[in-house]
Image: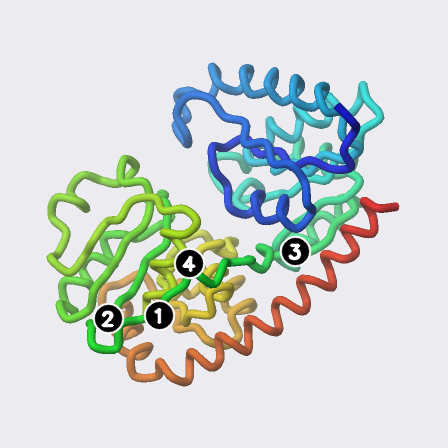
Amino acid sequence: MPRVDVVAVVWAPHEARTASFADWLKAPLYNIHYLGFKRLFFAPFKYPLQWMKTWYEMMRIHPRYIYVTDSPPVAGLCVYIYCLFTRTRYIMDTHTPNLYGDKWGWTAPLQRFLARRAVMNVVDQEAVKQVFESWNAPVIVLENPPKNIPQEWLGSPDPSGPTTLTYVGTFGDDEPIEVLLEAAQQLPDIQFYILGDTGLAEREWIDNAPKNVTYPGYLLKEEYWGLLSRSNAIIALTSHTFSLSGAAQDGIHIQKPVIISNQPPLRLHFTKGAVFVDHTCESMVKGIQTLIENEERLNQEIAELYEETSARWKQNFQALENLIQS
């Protein structure tokens, strides 16, 4: 097999950010994963398997560069050690929760070690870039890439139907699902879709959901973008004070107004086309009503934000491409 320029590696059965970067880099994508996803109990068993599988695939194709998502940081360590023994260099994409979250924050010294040895580090916000610069690690800011969504996947809201809002999440610990369900109960004329693997949801959220709430499950590709395009707006909520929210960024990519958490990174990024809410039922209801009242203006603003963020992203991505091609 001929040597390829760059491959993308992520230790997950599916991960939208890495998949998008693989598309833009025209790189083969390796989703390397065994056993249960996001279930810590399996970590001691699956990480050795994923380590061996990563090395097997890399030795088989022998790439010049590996674009690795360091969630978990063990994946970055695996690629680093592989590169020690081969003429390979790596680009590391660090997810911000890995630096500050309870789950992986304790590995910050390891992440610093790996970051300083990468040929480039990719982060999604300026504040995180400053951390890497303090480590003397090469770094570039790239939010989630613009999405190349086939036009035939897309629809539009039904003008004769109810207002439709789609919540995009994973049922993570940082997501205030209870607040959203309380708000939905007070807004019976609005249709809510809550996306995510229902196997990770609390049983009571499913069993006691209001009649205007539907759980379609974890959707991909045509089903995912189709539902978002038929919605009037996107909801993405997180209690993490450092998250830029990939779900909220999908609102930009599909050019739909977003209802998002009142967090500093989100306020800095979403300068228009967004309604910010606190994690209380009162704030959520008020935010939804504000969106409905101002939907036309917010639609125009989110289209403007899409153009601005896409132009900036493509300019920064060119620098990454130039590095690989050189």
Disc 1: which residue: 156
Residue 187: where, in percent of width, then height?
16, 69
Disc 2: which residue: 285
Choose mark 2 or mark 3, whichever is in front. Answer: 3
Amino acid carrying label 2: it is Val
Amino acid carrying label 1: it is Ser
Disc 4: which residue: 153
Residue 222: where, in percent of width, then height?
41, 52
Q: How far apart, in angstroms, are the residues tagged by discs 4 and 1?
A: 10 Å
Residue 151: where, in percent of width, then height?
47, 63
Choose mark 4 or mark 2, whichever is in front. Answer: 4
Residue 296: where, in percent of width, then height?
38, 84
Under tag 2, what secondary structure? helix
Question: As drawn, is 71 to the left or to the right of 117?
Answer: left
Question: As drawn, is 52 to the left or to the right of 178?
Answer: right
Q: Are marks 4 and 1 in contact (CB under 8 Å)?
A: no
Q: How far apart, in angstroms, are the residues tagged by discs 4 and 2?
A: 30 Å
Question: Which circle marks residue 84 in the picture?
Answer: none
Question: Which circle marks residue 142 in the picture?
Answer: 3
Q: Mark 1 or mark 3: which comes first in sequence?
A: 3
